[in-house]
Amino acid sequence: MGFTGSARLMLVLMVGSLWGMSMANKDWGSGFNHTGWGWGPYFPPNQTQGPNTINVGGSDNWHFGFNYTEWAFQNGPFYFNDTLVFKYDPPSNTTFPHSVYLLPNLWSFLTCDLRRAKMIANTTQGGGDGFHLKLNKWRPYYFACGERNGFHCKVGRMKFMVVPFFRWHR
Ligand SMILES: *[C@@H]1O[C@H](CO)[C@@H](O)[C@H](O)[C@H]1NC(C)=O
Ligand SMILES: *[C@@H]1O[C@H](CO)[C@@H](O)[C@H](O)[C@H]1NC(C)=O
Ligand SMILES: *[C@@H]1O[C@H](CO)[C@@H](O)[C@H](O)[C@H]1NC(C)=O
Ligand SMILES: *[C@@H]1O[C@H](CO)[C@@H](O)[C@H](O)[C@H]1NC(C)=O
Ligand SMILES: *[C@@H]1O[C@H](CO)[C@@H](O)[C@H](O)[C@H]1NC(C)=O
Ligand SMILES: *[C@@H]1O[C@H](CO)[C@@H](O)[C@H](O)[C@H]1NC(C)=O
Ligand SMILES: [Cu+2]
């Protein structure tokens, strides 16, 4: 038997004995509940489902004066590959159109400084099924409405931040 062969046999024996030990552990002190402490990965509650699609603001959609920080806090956490949907009337349907910007950092988010912000949805893109954004980057997302030069962000509370969590997959 070659080295690789015996190494493989060793591995099989080790796995076998580990398996046996874990089986034996289950019989220790009857009544001890092993759920979540076995060899398999542990899934925190509700993370076994696939990515979700979340409407920003719930039934309120994306509008002036709604507390989106509170909404994000209550409806989070959001996970990697979840999709956020921003719905708002296009200029043809409203006198107060909105938009969606990504702010570059926490300071610009706190101060609603749009100077280096990137527009990801213009005033018309929130119509119909809304603007869809997949959270597919490992980064904090600082969202804000860019209308009226920061007025909607500052006074209208149209901003929130999201750091996508990792979702454990089967
Ligand atoms: C172990 O605990 C889990 C969650 O607390 C419970 O659902 C399960 O029924 C328990 N199993 C046993 C054998 O007590
Ligand atoms: C788990 O997620 C589903 C849909 O994403 C939701 O309807 C359900 O209420 C959640 N359950 C818990 C315990 O959070
Ligand atoms: C939004 O709600 C949160 C939590 O209730 C609160 O702390 C915060 O001051 C509110 N934000 C604004 C801009 O009113
Ligand atoms: C996210 O989605 C991409 C493309 O659909 C997929 O390749 C990737 O495995 C997903 N990642 C996670 C962590 O779900
Ligand atoms: C908004 O973006 C859409 C899609 O890129 C484009 O078709 C439309 O002309 C833009 N509207 C405005 C007002 O810039
Ligand atoms: C705008 O309003 C018209 C008439 O009420 C409606 O048919 C249309 O679907 C609306 N457009 C959007 C994008 O919501
Ligand atoms: Cu706005």
Image: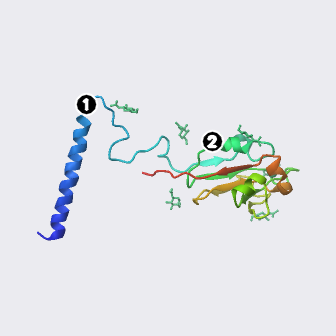
Query: Which quarter is ligand 2 in?
Result: top right
User: What x and y, as percent, mark residue 46?
Assistant: 50, 42
Confirm if mark 1 falls within 8 A of ligand 1: no
The extreme front residue here reads 107
> As drawn, is 10 to the left or to the right of 41?
left
Q: Secondary structure at mark 2?
A: helix
Q: Is residue 91 visible?
A: no
Q: CA distance from mark 1 to mark 2?
A: 41 Å
* Position of 115 relative to 80 (above/below): below
The residue under label 2 is which amino acid type?
Asn
Q: Residues within 10 Å of mark 2 (few under 14, many from 20)?
A: few
Return the residue nearer the eye: 97 or 69: 69
- Residue sitting at x 83%, y 53%: 97
Counting every numbered tag in the picture gives: 2
* Position of 81 relative to 34 (above/below): below
The residue under label 1 is which amino acid type?
Gly
Which residue is labeled 2 in the image? 75
User: What x and y, as percent, mark residue 28?
Assistant: 24, 34
Q: Earlier in the sequence, mark 1 or mark 2?
A: 1
* Position of 147 relative to 54 (above/below): below
Callouts 1 and 2 close, C-beta under 8 Å: no
User: What x and y, as percent, mark residue 5?
Assistant: 16, 67
Return the residue nearer the eye: 101 or 7: 7
